[in-house]
Image (tube, rainbow, N blue to C red):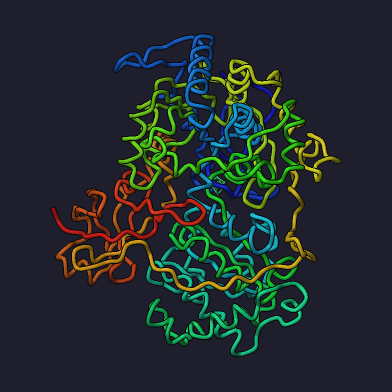
């Protein structure tokens, strides 16, 4: 239902760049916001963002499974039955028999509430999909510089002398940020792009490095090898602001550009030239994405990249680290504590003082200290009978998890599965209860983008039918479970509560958050003079090459990796319900090198079968610019049936490397 009134400002529900949309409540026409961060620009996803919310396929009322059918029930009955069953499971098996999966698409307030429910219920089994994207970045950044996030705002990108873009294709994943990179290039910045295929982003590059999958550390160490041997590093910064340089210097000596050429496929002379140009630029950004993190070596890959920045002092005023976030509130979900090893603000569970502070705010003695399950560990825990009930908001692990066959098997085994979503997703098909959530444009709330800017999103429409904003559903659930303090009557009450946990927000109020530029948490630019480590210094950590979990062989000769497409988003539940976007989408195809295709007698558009040790899928082929021996599959729909679920230290699966074979069926 339209609510009328003046134009509303709404945060885009898709990527983590955080564009704001201006929506006319009368006509629902979307226009781009002129201020920061999108400066009058939107990509097609933002432009057509209202369409999926208006889909006829939305879940309209609470549903309960009765044998094979889903029957409507009232909200009262749904909350009473779900609460009763969760409490019963806790009584019999303990609180750790229940796990909660929060969403990177719901607001800060809603993420804050779900992690509060989990912890008051008695478990740290609370996680979100940051686990399968940038958790490796969080672990590496926390260890080296003491904070787990992007260090600088987008605006800095325009002024740096060089930009190193690694395993990241912003032209398709965060299209609006390309304008910042273009502006930097116009000002003379050198652009180096590293990827496993020739991406659209490479059109901007001075150096295009198409590397073999899984060889990132070799390339990073070779870049450092050149910088150290030619004494191009920032001696003063290293001396005053870091520790561990001598170990890194020793470790990278054997990674000569010539050795790196053999392993990565990038010519040694180009590695030398790019390393020199990056070092001599005087300032630089390093931006990276899933191509870096979704490996068994994900944490070490990020450490190697951070080492380059530390070597040159490219952090703070002279540079920035940009782990670019995927979903619109994945940064907020993590910052609000929807992670199994961190409380809000990435504060470790072991921090007794903060734990007590949180407990006192919530009106209890203490909260659990043991780390909960990672999202990627939940499926084996169900198989072991350790998890009996799962509460999922807005995530679709039946499609988004690596090797999803075992996830679907686990979902079938649960005593109780509750899914809170807009649609009957592939995951919701296994649910005992489905709770209809309101769309992004049917509620108020705050969201944090990749640069840590918290922005307010206004309600444009009344919730569809009997759907409710997630924060209202969670308030009812908290009450149903008998948890203290679940009396919220407005979303702002929850905003105020999370503000009270962050000393940096003590002086701020909701009006600051609703202002044109929002609020940066903890501040706009980090580490300009000190790192958040115990001694205030950043730590170099030497890393050696770690091979992928699987190696290619005669039976599985190809390295299969996954990629994203501009018109699709995650598991397609939103974009496929947008008529304008579906018109723009072509059929997803597997990308294969021309010589490999010729040898296998595969032509453009042929149907091919791709098989890994986990199963097979069929897809049409596209002959394109990818290295020999590599095939790239869009991850959005069925690719994860065959991807590898081996985990890195941060719990992220190796989506980016599976040994595969390919043939015409
Ligand atoms: Fe939305 Fe990202 Fe596109 Fe901006 S770039 S409109 S935030 S999907």
338 shown above or below 262? above
Quadrant in which the N terminus appears: top right
Asked whether the viewer can see residue 80, the reply is yes
The furthest residue to the right = 507
> Which image quadrant is residue 396 in?
top left
Residue at 52% of width from left, 20% of height from top? 91
Res. 534 image quadrant: bottom right
Q: Mark yes or no: residue 185 visible.
A: no
List x then y, in percent, for residue 105: 55, 37
Q: Quadrant of residue 577?
A: top left
Front one among 297 and 75: 297
Does residue 542 sit above or below 49 in this rendering?
below
Residue at the spot 16% in from the left edge and 70% down from the top edge = 599
Identify the residue at image location x=47%, y=52%. 652
Q: Nearer the viewer, residue 239 or 395?
A: 239
Going by the image, does 415 lie left or right of 592? right
Seen in the picture, residue 197 relative to 124 is either above or below; the reply is: below
Residue 448 at x, y percent in the picture: 65, 43
Residue 455 or residue 5, whichever sits in front: 455
Q: x%, y% of residue 97?
A: 48, 30
Q: Which percent across, then down, holds residue 412?
A: 33, 29
């Amino acid at each position: 239902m339209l609510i009328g009134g003046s134009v509303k400002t709404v945060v885009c529900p898709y990527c983590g760049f955080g564009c704001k949309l201006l929506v006319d409540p009368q006509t629902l026409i979307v226009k781009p916001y002129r201020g920061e961060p999108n400066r009058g620009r939107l990509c097609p996803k933002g432009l057509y963002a209202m369409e999926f919310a208006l889909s006829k396929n939305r879940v309209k009322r609470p549903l309960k499974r009765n044998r094979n059918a889903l029957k409507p029930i009232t909200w009262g009955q749904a909350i009473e039955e779900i609460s009763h069953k969760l409490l019963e499971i806790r009584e019999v098996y303990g609180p750790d028999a229940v796990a909660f999966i929060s969403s990177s698409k719901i607001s800060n307030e809603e993420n804050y509430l779900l992690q509060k429910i989990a912890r008051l219920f008695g478990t740290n089994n609370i996680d979100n999909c940051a686990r399968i994207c940038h958790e490796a970045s969080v672990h590496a950044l926390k260890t080296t510089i003491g904070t787990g996030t992007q260090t600088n705002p987008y605006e800095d990108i325009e002024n740096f002398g060089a930009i190193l873009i690694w395993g990241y294709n912003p032209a398709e994943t965060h299209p609006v940020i390309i304008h910042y990179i273009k502006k930097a290039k116009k000002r003379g910045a050198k652009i180096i792009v590293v990827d496993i295929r020739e991406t659209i982003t490479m059109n901007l590059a001075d150096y295009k490095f198409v590397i073999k999958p899984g060889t990132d550390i070799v390339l990073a160490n070779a870049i450092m090898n050149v910088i150290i041997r030619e004494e191009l590093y920032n001696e003063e910064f290293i001396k005053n602001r870091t520790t561990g340089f001598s170990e890194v210097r020793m470790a990278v000596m054997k990674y000569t550009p010539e050795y790196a050429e053999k392993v990565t496929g990038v010519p040694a002379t180009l590695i030398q030239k790019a390393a020199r140009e990056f070092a001599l630029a005087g300032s630089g950004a390093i931006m990276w994405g899933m191509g870096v993190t979704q490996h068994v070596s994900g944490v070490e890959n990020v450490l190697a990249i951070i080492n380059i920045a530390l070597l040159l002092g490219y952090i703070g005023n002279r540079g920035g680290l940009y782990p670019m976030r995927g979903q619109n509130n994945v940064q907020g979900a993590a910052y609000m504590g929807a992670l199994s090893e961190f409380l809000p603000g990435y504060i470790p569970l072991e921090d007794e003082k903060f734990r007590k502070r949180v407990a006192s705010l919530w009106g209890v003695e203490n909260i659990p200290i043991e780390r909960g399950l990672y999202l990627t560990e939940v499926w084996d825990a169900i198989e072991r009978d350790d998890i009996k009930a799962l509460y999922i908001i807005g995530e679709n692990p039946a499609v988004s998890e690596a090797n999803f066959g075992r996830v679907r098997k686990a979902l079938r085994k649960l005593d109780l599965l509750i899914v809170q979503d807009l649609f009957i997703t592939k995951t919701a098909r296994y649910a005992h209860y489905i709770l209809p959530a309101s769309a992004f444009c049917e509620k108020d709330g705050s969201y944090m983008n990749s640069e840590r800017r918290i922005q307010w999103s206004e309600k444009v429409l009344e919730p569809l039918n009997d759907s409710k904003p997630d924060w209202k559903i969670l308030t009812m659930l908290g009450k149903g479970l008998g948890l203290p303090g679940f009396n919220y009557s407005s979303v702002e009450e929850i905003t105020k509560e999370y503000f009270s946990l962050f000393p940096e927000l003590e002086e701020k109020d909701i009006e600051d958050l609703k202002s044109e530029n929002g609020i940066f948490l903890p501040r706009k630019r980090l580490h300009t003079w000190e790192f958040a480590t115990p001694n205030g210094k950043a730590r170099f950590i030497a890393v050696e090459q770690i091979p992928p979990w699987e190696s290619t062989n005669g039976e599985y000769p190809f390295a299969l990796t996954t990629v994203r497409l501009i018109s699709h988003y995650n598991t397609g539940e939103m974009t496929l319900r947008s008529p304008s976007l579906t018109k723009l989408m072509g059929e997803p195809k597997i990308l294969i090198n021309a010589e490999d295709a010729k040898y296998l007698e595969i032509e453009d558009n042929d149907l091919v079968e791709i098989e890994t040790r986990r199963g097979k899928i069929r897809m049409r082929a596209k002959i394109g610019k990818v290295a020999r021996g590599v095939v790239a599959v869009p991850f959005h729909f069925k690719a994860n049936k065959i991807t590898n679920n081996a985990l890195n230290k941060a719990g992220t699966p190796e989506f980016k490397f599976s040994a595969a074979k390919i043939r015409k069926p």
